Amino acid sequence: MRNEIIENKEFYILSRSVDNAEKCVVISLNEDCFVVKLQNIRKYEIDESVELFTMTNKGQLYFETIVKDVKDDTISVWYPISYKYLQRRQYSRIRLEEETELVCKDKKIPARIFDISAGGLKVNTKEQLQLLDEYSISLDFENKKLDMTFEPIRIEVGNNEFVSSGRFKNISSYDRIALVQYCFRKQIENSNK
């Protein structure tokens, strides 16, 4: 697994506080730890538990570790004892049954979400969506409101309903990281049931 931790490799780093979620890049490798530079300064503490993940050719690499040292926007973290390859997709996808509303050109379309990831979602609607049109969507996760744009890239028809799969556009890094963290937590909760 250490061969996946190389200089200039981009990771997402998460602490217990979603406000600390951030992108980072590996800037140096040491015998017992590696150093990452945060995209934006966040509040991390020595001996704090953190989660890191990145995409590799084997799938999404995920591990937990401990902060060794913090200096402004650089953090030294111990190499992890264990790790997992979660999936081959870029973002973890979770099942979700939630009612929502899509808005396109001032028209509101009721929808039910089937699954979601930080990259996009799958929805069921009574009305056919248009491929590559942009639909505004607002979602509430863990008391955080996320406003995004959904772009359908595949539509299936069945039982007088339409199932549309698509990607998020114009999503802020903060909202994407919040979704990544939400999906990871739900994935871990579901695997522990």
Image (tube, helix red, strand yellow):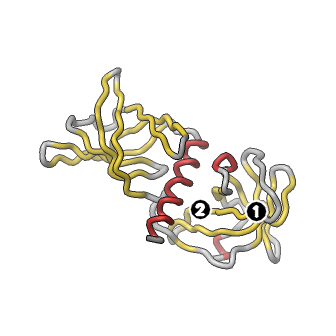
- Give the label on residue 186, or none: none
Task: Name the amino acid, label 1.
Answer: Glu
Instruction: Determine which residue is flagged by label 2.
Output: 54
**In this rendering, does residue 90 appear at all?**
no
Depicted 173 relative to depicted 187: above or below: above
Q: Quadrant of residue 61?
A: bottom right
Depicted 156 relative to depicted 172: above or below: below
The residue sitting at 45% across, 52% down in the picture is 117
In percent of width and height, residue 149 lies at 44, 35
In percent of width and height, residue 125 lies at 24, 40
Left or right, 40 with respect to 152, comes to: right
The residue sitting at 82% across, 62% down in the picture is 46
**105 vs 183, nearest the viewer:** 183
Left or right, 19 with respect to 134, comes to: right
**182 vs 122, nearest the viewer:** 182
The residue sitting at 63% across, 49% down in the picture is 18
**In this rendering, does residue 132 appear at all?**
yes
Instruction: Determine which residue is flagged by label 1.
Output: 48
In percent of width and height, residue 171 lies at 52, 39
**188 vs 102, nearest the viewer:** 188
Label 2 neighbourhood size at 10 Å, few (<14), some (14-19), many (20+)?
many
Left or right, 78 with respect to 180, comes to: right
